[in-house]
Image (cartoon, rainbow, N blue to C red):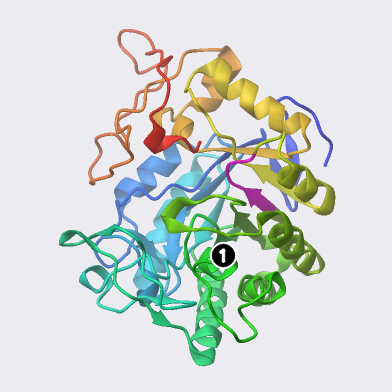
Amino acid sequence: MTQPTDLLAPAEFGRLSLPNRLVMAPMTRNRAAADGTPTPLMAEYYAQRATAGLIVAEAATPNAVGQTYPDITALHTPSHVAGWRQVTDAVRDAGGRMFLQLQHGGRIGHPATSGHTPLAPSPVPLPGTVFTAEGHQPGVVPREMTADDIRATVADFAAAARRALDAGFEGVEVHSANGYLLHQFLAGNTNRRTDAYGGPAAGRIRFTVEVVEAVAAEIGAERVGVRISPGLTVNGIEEGDTEDLYPALVAALRPLGPAYLHVVYADPDSPVFRRIRADWPGTLIANPVLNELTTDAVRRAGERLLAAGADLVALGRPFLANPDLVARLRLGAPLNPVRDRYLMYVGGPDGYTDYPTLSESESGPASSSEPASSASMVA
């Protein structure tokens, strides 16, 4: 892939021709039915944003024990497939393309929500509280995964990937970031195992590699992406050896040939980011940190990442508040402000499908020059 610095330049992405280099990042919005089935409101939301070069849909759990919060999506029953098919059909009819993120919550779960004791690499609870169907509750001590649990979970990821294609997605993104199960295996403070899945970096990366390998074998490596968040401490994660861990992970993933690597909190000046770009031969998607949500700030951040070697740029909050983000960037138009600033998603259309496009705004587009809050810094 060539390296233009124009966010609106087209790109070739495997079998897909993308009209621009903007990726709508996966964002959990808690609009699914209680059993994890996507809803018609979700189909409307994603279709509104179909001008993105690529949409990576929000995290879907590959099994029941992997559920994190209430009303998140899943992909382990026929009803889940049918619900997601409504979403992909709507996006395709609007001219868009979609991957689906697959995520197991690990210790970020609660029996009050899922009905299961969470599984994790080690019995280390999430510090603080977790939001459940019964409100915020203290994190519970997860059950340490056995070898059988690990094998079953790998198989569940592969089966969910197959269901994703049945549901109309172009591919899947394996979520190994942001403090969820795969990231818990990577991090030293949450992985205290002494078997082949723990200890040095070579052991801690093994679970992620096995999941990616199984998913690629099931649907083809060209349909598989991987999301990582080097150094990110969200959800109580402390890696301890970030600068050694991610080169080892990239080296192990490279022979499997995934379609892309998606880096969260990508800093073009970071030695870790530069090392990943140098070591990764395929498509690199970079998600910037945005301290303000203005047209100029979004454009500058994206162009810096492209100049540093990223192939595509993933944006979250700008797409959340601006269904026509691509048009706004093309015209240099102001952006809508994000109304639910603290990302507290409680269901319904408010702050979800009711953000106006430029043509729908009666009084002209609203500018957002106010800095983002510290609670919502990831783009």
Q: Residues within 10 Å of mark 1 (few under 14, many from 20)?
A: many
Q: Residue at x 24, y 68 (%)?
A: 113
Quick check: 157 left or right of 35? right
- Left/right of residue 296 with respect to residue 120 in the rendered view: right
User: Which range of residues does the magenta coloring cover?
Assistant: 261-266
Percent coordinates x, y for residue 74 in the rendering: 39, 66
Residue 275 spot, x, y in % from top left: 79, 48
In this view of the protein, can residue 85 be seen by the observer?
no
Does the image show residue 13?
yes
State the residue position of label 1. 187
Residue 329, percent across and down? 57, 20
Question: Is 90 placed left or right of 355 in the picture?
Answer: right
| The residue positioned farthest toward the top in the image shown | 363
Q: In the picture, residue 136 is in which quadrant?
A: bottom left
Name above or below for residue 89 compared with residue 193: above
Q: Secondary structure at mark 1?
A: loop
Give me the residue at 59% from left, 51% from top: 231
- Which residue lies at the image location 23% right of the left edge and 46% below the top edge? 346
Magenta span contains residue 263: yes
| Along the viewing direction, whichever of 97 and 1 lies nearer the viewer | 1
Three-letter amino acid code of the residue under disc 1? Ala
Vertical relation: 179 (above or below) 264:
below
Quarter occupied by the N terminus: top right
Where's residue 317, x and y in %? Answer: 44, 34
Nearer to us in this view, 258 or 340: 340
